[in-house]
Image (tube, rainbow, N blue to C red):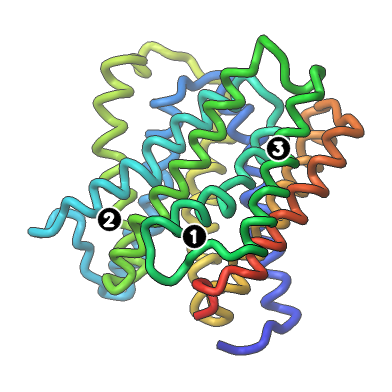
Amino acid sequence: MREAKSGDILLLTLLGLIWGSSFFNIKIATFSYEPFTLALIRVIFASLPLLILCWYKKIKVLAFSENWKPYALIGLCNIAIPFTLIAIGTAKINSYLAAMLMSTTPMSGSILAHFFTKDEKITFLKSIGILIGFLGILFLFFDKLIINESNFIYVLITILGSTFYSIGGILTLKLRAKGNENVTTSTTLWSVIFLLPLSMIFETPWQSTPSLESTLALLYLGVVATGLAWLIRFRILTVNGLVFQTQVAYLIPIFGVLFGYFLMDEIITWRVLISLIIIILGIYIVKKNNKGLKK
């Protein structure tokens, strides 16, 4: 893996910008789309560029091969469930708060990796980073303007969505020899299969009349924030490695806060800014001591 150049840093920043912008777009999409339908349309849009990529590179998609079960499980835990939970949560909380809550993924992922992998055990310094990061989240709960009785449960739902990303990440490690493009495409296709009946049964989307604004936001979520972002992520992984790519975790909550404040007119309090600093510090310590990522 080569040392990061200015172009690589620009791509990493672009990835953070895209993923950070996904939360206010989720918020806009929830104005017209219910959670299962939102997640379904998002993954349908995302699957198109992935299928085209696999066709272009002549990569065999193993979603429905003999060993389909791991792909189905990852599609459920890493895409279908978190996409739905995040849509439910973001509908009732500030979009930047969702971005900040999602930054717990590296920390919850480190805890899960300690128990379910052999080479990513929690060290003393990593445990300090995890504790600091979660204290940053806990500090938000003292800001009654941002988190209160009316949205408390939706905050927990969003955190649960973040945790499922970590669970999905652990499961994905078992398929890393199967190729990144194949795994991502196969799991995305399975997420469509899971979400389609749920949307049809519980939300009857054919009866809805979504706004153009919400539809464009959902199109952006699928094509750009999921499909294109994955392609950028894959390029960074192959050129610069996993350690460099994981640095995007610092950028997502920062961009999420900026987008929420400037585009959604969401209130930013001093507690939010302090919490953001604490969370980023926690992520930094965790990642700096994450020996299992240095590959």
Disc on the earlier residue, 3 or 2: 3
The residue sitting at the right extreme is 270
Q: Is residue 177 above or below residue 42?
A: below
Q: Nearer the viewer, residue 129 or 32?
A: 129
The N terminus, quarter of image: bottom right
Q: Distance of mark 3 from mark 1, alpha carbons?
A: 27 Å
Circle 3 or circle 2, nearest the eye: 3
Q: Which residue sits at x=61%, y=45%?
A: 104
Going 36% across and 50% down the picture, which residue do you hit? 47
The residue type indicated by label 3 comes to Ile
Q: Position of residue 36 (x, y in %)?
A: 39, 26
Which residue is identified by label 2? 186
Name the element at disc 2: helix
Position of residue 232 relative to residue 106, above or below, is: below
Total number of numbered discs in the rendering? 3
Residue 172 found in image quarter: bottom left
Q: Secondary structure at mark 1?
A: helix
Residue lying furthest bottom = 2
Q: Is disc 3 in contact with disc 1, using a CB cutoff of under 8 Å?
A: no
Give percent across and percent down for residue 257.
Answer: 78, 40
Residue linked to disc 3? 137
> Can residue 188 be seen in the rendering of this structure?
yes
Q: Which residue is mark 1?
A: 230
Residue 40 as seen in the image, left or right of residue 34 = left
Of pointers 2 and 1, the one earlier in the residue sequence: 2
